[in-house]
Amino acid sequence: MSSASSTNIATLIAADHLDSGMLSEVADRLRDAGLEPGEHDWLEQGKAGDLAFKGAIEAARDALRGVENTMDICVQPSTNRRKMLLVSDMDSTIITIECIDELADYAGIKAEIAEITERAMQGELDFEGALRGRVALLKGLHRDTIQQCIDERVRLTPGADILLQTMRGWGAHGLLVSGGFTDFVAAVVDMAGFDSMAANRLGISGDYLDGTVDGDIVDAREKARQLHNARQQLGIAPELVLSAGDGANDILMVEAAIEGGGIGAAFHAKPALAEKANFAIRHNDLTALLFAQGVRRSDWNIG
């Protein structure tokens, strides 16, 4: 935790428009909590900006919870803001869908599988058991359906490609870790611009899914392990890690980034994850992760 004399940053990203009245309210809330607000710096005029303050980070987070209905807020030290490792979940984070639910739609059982997916993401079900159970229901689906689903339904979440392109522009590494399947993840790695990946592999016999998952499961523990391994192999300091996800199976990965002094982000997330993250994105797209790193909109790599 930061000392009372250190300078920290609250990044404010409006759901709609950030005006002087909102900035004043934030500053007042910090003062009321015994903190010392300082200068404001626009990252995008009328949309996002940094407000410096002196005092404890946790106290600032607590003080600003009351304005989270109008803006996304990332509170962090003023140093080491640009991260060198991005580790992200895929489904409902980097892409807009849950791939297994869409595969199930082609099999005519989307409602049945989507209910299990939702419960697993809420943390109500064991992830591995829920995954194996859903995959078993897809037995007999033709393998060509995978590519059809990719072509017809896989779309990047707004801001995903800008986030990756901009971070890679300063030399950061992007790792996509997913409890989904390699065919989808490999396609999204290319679409978004990630450097590496880890995912599950669907069992296939001949031209049809055989209802199994090959090898060990990429679950919550494996996602966190992948983060640690990538950081160590790349020689990246723990405070230079950013992780992002949306479901309960991303909690350990997000906590791993936070424990190292980095950012663990919850993106339009289930409550189980949002309460663990140190940055919850509720209103904005993935470019909020660039604002959190102090990157002005004029410096984004839009390609």
Image: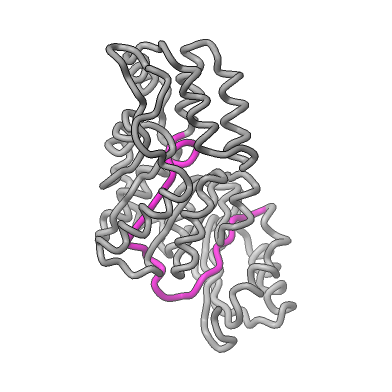
Q: Is residue 169 left or right of residue 113?
A: left
Q: Is residue 101 above or below residue 173?
A: above
Q: Check the picture and name the quadrant holding the C terminus.
A: top left
Q: Is residue 133 left or right of residue 182?
A: right
Q: Is residue 193 above or below residue 62?
A: above
Pick the front one: 213 or 67: 213
> What residue sits 60% from the left and 79% below the top?
56
Report how many numbered discs are placed on residues in the image. 0
* Residue 144 coordinates in the image, percent (x, y): 32, 14
Quarter-of-image position of residue 177: top left
* Residue 14 coordinates in the image, percent (x, y): 59, 54
> What residue sits 54% from the left and 81% below the top?
2
Pick the front one: 4 or 162: 4
Q: Is residue 16 something one can see in this rendering?
A: no
* Residue 272 coordinates in the image, percent (x, y): 63, 49
Q: Is residue 146 left or right of residue 291?
A: left
> What residue sits 35% from the left and 43% below the top?
161
Q: Is residue 75 left or right of residue 93?
A: right
Q: Check the picture and name the quadrant holding the N terminus.
A: bottom right
Q: Is residue 205 above or below residue 214?
A: above
Residue 85 forms part of the magenta stretch: yes
Residue 98 forms part of the magenta stretch: no
Residue numbers of the magenta segment: 70-95
